[in-house]
Amino acid sequence: ALIANGQIHQAVEECEHVVSFLAVVFSHVQNHPLLGLQLYTLGDLYGAASTMGDGRDLPEEKKYSTKSTYAYTWAKKVMMVTHGANDPMVQTLDDNIANGVKP
């Protein structure tokens, strides 16, 4: 609902809470697929938040761009185990990490 209403920053905050929760709950399962998929979503949300500005390359936009890369990198680490290197989502993560998010 937050994304549909254009409330990307609030969606980022909620997704961060979900990732934190899943990291604790699945601490005994290092590479749980649900954590990997939620990290993928968080990276996408960070990417969307990094492009919400007016194009002046503000520090806030750069922060979200950097966080996007971190989330994608963690997601890839998990999803390489849970999905495999040839999975289309993992290959998209490779592209996202290589190209970065340009605010």
Image: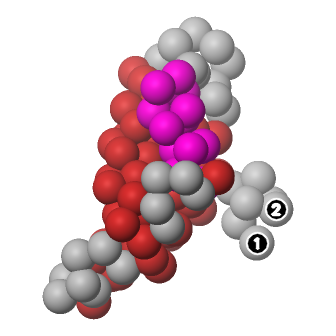
Is residue 92 covered in magenta?
yes
| Percent of width and height locating residue 100 | 49, 26
Q: Is residue 25 left or right of residue 62?
A: left
Give the residue drawn at x 66%, y 32%. 52
Q: Amino acid at mark 1?
A: Ala
Query: Pointer 2 and pointer 1: residues touching (CB < 8 Å)?
Result: yes
| Percent of width and height locating residue 98 | 47, 26
Residue with the mark numbered 2? 4
Of residue 47 and residue 5, the one placed in the foreground of this image is 47
The stretch in magenta equals 89-101
| Numbered circle sitting on residue 82 | none
Q: Amino acid at mark 2?
A: Ala
Tell me if residue 36 can be seen.
Answer: no
In which quadrant will I find the C terminus? top right
- Quarter of image, res 73: top left
- Quarter of image, res 102: top right
Give the residue drawn at x 31%, y 73%. 31
- Relative to 1, say whether 40 is above or below: above
Residue with the mark numbered 1? 1
Tell me if residue 25 can be seen.
Answer: yes
Magenta portion: prevailing SS class: helix
